[in-house]
Image (cartoon, rainbow, N blue to C red):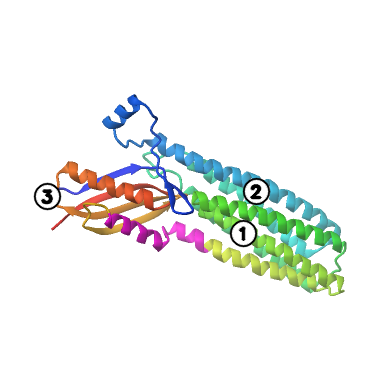
Amino acid sequence: MEPHGHSHEHRNEHHHGHEHEHGHGHPQGHWSSLRHLLRPHSHDAADRLDSTLETSAEGLRTLWISLVVLALTAGVQAVVVALSGSVALLGDTVHNLADALTAVPLGLAFLLGRRAANRRYPYGYGRAEDLAGVAVVAVVAASAVFAAVTAVHRLLHPQPVGQLWAVVGAALVGCLGNEWVARYRIGTGRRIGSAALVADGLHARTDGLASLAVLLGAAGSAADWRLADPVVGLVITGAILLVLRSSAREVGRRLMDGVDPALLDVAERELRAVQGVYGVGALRLRWIGHSLRAEADVLVDGSLTVAAGHQVAEAAEHALIRAVPRLRAATVHLDPYT
C-alpha cells in the first residue's frame, strides 16, 4: 500500500477538568446531513479563519483594555514624579508606559494573524505574533537600561524626594493597576495559547512588584536616607531583568519551534490507542501563532485498502485533535507494518 497523507482543520477548545469541545461547525438539518455525507469533514479556509478571528478578537480586546488601564496608571504616576522628583517612581512610570506600548506590536500581530493563508504564506500569518514577542522583549530591555542609567545618576548626585505621601499613593496605584492587567493578560494568553501575551502579562506582574519597591524608597527618604530612592531604582532594574530573562526564553522557544514535551507524550499515547495503529514513528508539533500543528507517522497493516487506511488516518487525526489543546490541524502519514 502506498503511504497515505491526510490533513484536516479542526476547532479545539481546552477547558480545565480535561473537558474538550470538538466541533466542526456544520449546520443542523436533513440537507446539511446529506451534504456532510457527500463531503465529510470538509474544513475549508473560511472555517479556519473563523477560529482565528475568535482568538484574535479576544486577544485584541485584552490588549486594548490593558493599554487603557496602564496608560491611566502611568499618567497618575507621571504627575507625582513631576511633583516629587522620585527616581524610583520615574523608573516604575517609564516601565509602565513601555508595558502599555507593547500592546501596539501585539495588536498589529493579532490583526495580521487574521489573514487567510495563501500560496506565499501557506501556513498563514500566525508567526507575526512571535515577531511581536521579540518587540516586547526589546521594549523590556530598553526600559531596564533607562531605569538603570537614571538610578546610577541619582546615586552619584543624590537629591531629596518630596511629596512622600503622593509617592506612596502612586506606588499603590501602580501595583494594583499592573496586577489587574497581569491577571487579565496571562489568563487570556493561556486560554488562546499566546506566548507573547503571557510574556506581556508576566512583564506587568513584575511592574506591580516594582511599584511596591517604590514604597521602600519612600520609607527610606522619610528616614532622611537620600540614597534609598536610587537604590530602590536599581532593585526595580533587577526585577525588570528577571522578567526579561523569562520572557526572552519563552519567546525564543516559540521561534525555535519548541513545545512542551508533555504534549508529545499525550499525542503519542493517543495515537497508540487508535484501533488499527500498530506503532508511532516520527511525531512533531509546532506552534504557529497561538495554534498548534501536528505531523505524525503511524504504522498500519500493509494489506489495508486505501479506504480502510483513510479511516485509520482519520481516527488518528481526531484522537490528536481531541487530546492536544490548541491543536488546529494534523497531518497523518501511514506506513506499512510487517
Which is more toward the observer, 113 or 292?
292
Q: Which residues are magenta?
A: 249-273
Say which element carries label 1: helix
Q: In percent of the image, x 78 and y 54: which residue is there?
A: 78
Question: Which mark lies nearer to you, 3 or 2?
Answer: 3
Residue 87 lies, in percent from the top left, at: 78, 64
Q: In percent of the image, x 60 and y 56: which residue is there?
A: 201
Say which element carries label 3: loop
Q: How many marks?
A: 3
Q: Is residue 131 visible?
A: no
What whole-number distance in Å separates the C-alpha atoms at marks 1 and 2?
12 Å
What whole-number distance in Å separates the C-alpha atoms at marks 3 and 1?
56 Å
Q: Where does label 1 land, which residue? A: 203
Question: Which mark lies nearer to you, 3 or 1?
Answer: 3
Label 2 CA crowd tier, 10 Å (few <14, some 14–19, many 20+): many
Mark on residue 192? none
Mark on residue 66? 2
Mark on residue 303? 3
179 lies left or right of 59: right
Check if residue 251 falls in the magenta segment. Answer: yes
135 lies left or right of 155: left
Whichever of labels 3 and 2 marks the residue nearer the N terminus, that label is 2
Q: Are marks 3 and 2 in contact (CB under 8 Å)?
A: no
Q: Amino acid at mark 2?
A: Ser
* Res 140 → quadrant: bottom right
